[in-house]
Image: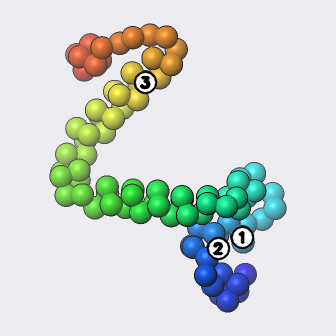
């Protein structure tokens, strides 16, 4: 792919256009709006990573996020686990 062929496209769109045909997600990545959504998600993650408080308390935040994810997964399976019970374990 030449630089001129990527003109006017987002970085994600340019990458998606240059992928090999055997990439199972290439067709999804090429759909309208996907590249822009990927770019927006990447920008949001970069913003979170740059947040000073989140960097200082990353271990605490990671633990809380993991507990909430575990609770959500359990809820999908029909279990109702109070967060306080999970934090006590």
Name the outermost residue toward the top: 79
Q: Are marks 1 and 2 in contact (CB under 8 Å)?
A: yes
Residue 67 position by quadrant: top left
Residue 34's spot in the image, x, y percent?
Answer: 61, 58
Residue 21's spot in the image, x, y percent?
Answer: 81, 62
* Label 2: how many Cα within 10 Å (few below 14, some 14–19, many 20+): some
State which tag comes first along the sequence, 2 or 3. 2
Residue 11 position by quadrant: bottom right
Q: Name which residue lies at 67% across and 61% down.
A: 32
Say which residue label 2 marks.
14
Q: Name which residue lies at 70% across and 58% down.
A: 31
Say which residue label 3 marks.
72
Labelled disc at residue 17: 1
Cα gap from disc 2 to disc 3, whole angstroms: 36 Å
Instruction: Inspect this view and state whether residue 27 appears.
Output: yes
- Relative to 44, 56 lies left or right: left
Instruction: Inspect this view and state whether residue 23 appears.
Output: no
State which tag comes first along the sequence, 3 or 1. 1
């Amino acid at each position: 792919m030449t630089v001129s062929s990527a003109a006017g496209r987002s970085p994600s769109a340019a990458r998606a256009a240059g992928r090999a045909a055997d990439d199972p997600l290439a067709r999804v990545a090429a759909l309208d709006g996907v590249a822009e959504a990927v770019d927006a998600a990447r920008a949001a993650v970069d913003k979170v990573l740059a947040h000073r408080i989140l960097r200082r308390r990353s271990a605490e935040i990671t633990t809380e996020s993991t507990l909430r994810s575990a609770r959500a997964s359990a809820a999908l399976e029909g279990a109702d686990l109070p967060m306080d019970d999970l934090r006590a374990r």
